[in-house]
Image (cartoon, rainbow, N blue to C red):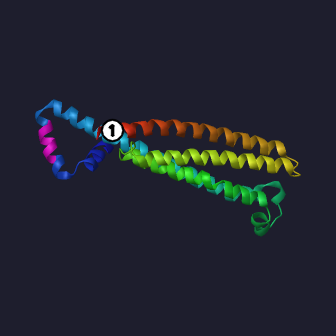
């Protein structure tokens, strides 16, 4: 049932009626039509799904950033003003989260380009370059945060250092992947511009 709805969405009604008459006459045309529909579906739905996942990751990260200070041990009896405006490390964490959200936005744009079959474009290369730079800046923020934790008078330095290592490892992986994809796409864009 859903396959019929998808086919109707891909083809408008008049074209669908004409196409269905043609498909009855030749089994080869049925195969070609299904291949064309599957090609459209294979591009659009996975990219839309990944865009939705990207938005959900952003919402979850924002919710975590707003919720976590309330359950932190030292803020158990603090007011909202004391939680959000008297903690310099929390302000630093919010500042350091800006590159993360910028990278998520750029990933959303790249996925949109891929869904429209425009992934081999200078805009996609620029988005990947921005993702790489955001990942590198997150690593820089983490290193500065680790120095802040090390110089501070915290009782639980090990937890902060471990979280910093995890975030740095993830950022290194993302920066490496973005650099590799950027290089591949840049080569494809250069080849495409030479041929046209």
Q: Nearer the viewer, residue 134 or 70?
A: 134
- Crowd rating for badge 1 (residues with CA inside 10 Å; few <14, some 14–19, many 20+): few
In the rendered image, the quadrant that contains the N terminus is top left
Vertical placement of residue 89 versus 188, above or below: below
- For label 1, the SS is helix
In the picture, residue 64 is in which quadrant? Answer: bottom right
- The image shows residue 40 at horizontal and vertical percentages of 31, 42
Q: Is residue 35 left or right of residue 108?
A: left
In the rendered image, the quadrant that contains the C terminus is top left
Outermost residue, left side: 25
Q: Is residue 70 left or right of residue 20?
A: right
**Residue occupying the point 22% across, 37% down:** 33
Q: Is residue 183 left or right of residue 156?
A: left
- The image shows residue 167 at horizontal and vertical percentages of 68, 43
Vertical placement of residue 155 versus 169, above or below: below
Residue underneath mark 1: 194
Q: Main secondary structure of the magenta part?
A: helix
**Residue occupying the point 36% across, 47% down:** 116
Outermost residue, top side: 28
**Residue occupying the point 81% across, 60% down:** 75
Q: Nearer the viewer, residue 173 or 67?
A: 173
Q: Is residue 153 visible?
A: yes
User: Is 18 within the magenta?
Assistant: yes
Q: Is residue 191 left or right of residue 179?
A: left
User: Is 19 within the magenta?
Assistant: yes
Q: Is residue 111 visible?
A: no
Question: Magenta segment, which residues?
Answer: 17-23
Vertical placement of residue 28 versus 179, above or below: above
Q: How many marks?
A: 1
- The image shows residue 6 at horizontal and vertical percentages of 30, 46
- The image shows residue 193 at horizontal and vertical percentages of 34, 41
């Amino acid at each position: 049932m859903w396959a019929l709805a998808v086919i109707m969405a891909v083809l408008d009604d008049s074209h669908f009626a004409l196409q269905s008459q043609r498909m009855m006459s030749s089994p080869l045309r049925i195969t070609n039509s299904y291949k064309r529909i599957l090609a459209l579906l294979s591009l659009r739905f996975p990219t839309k799904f990944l865009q939705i996942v990207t938005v959900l990751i952003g919402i979850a990260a924002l919710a975590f950033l707003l919720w976590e200070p309330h359950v932190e041990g030292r803020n158990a009896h603090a007011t909202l003003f004391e939680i959000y405006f008297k903690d310099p490390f929390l302000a630093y964490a919010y500042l350091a989260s800006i590159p993360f959200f910028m990278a998520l936005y750029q990933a959303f744009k790249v996925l949109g380009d891929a869904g429209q079959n425009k992934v081999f474009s200078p805009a996609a290369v620029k988005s990947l370059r921005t993702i790489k730079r955001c990942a590198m800046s997150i690593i820089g923020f983490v290193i500065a945060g680790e120095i802040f934790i090390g110089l501070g008078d915290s009782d639980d330095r090990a937890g902060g250092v471990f979280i910093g290592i995890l975030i740095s490892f993830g950022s290194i992986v993302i920066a490496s992947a973005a650099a590799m994809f950027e290089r591949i796409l840049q080569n494809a864009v250069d080849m495409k511009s030479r041929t046209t």
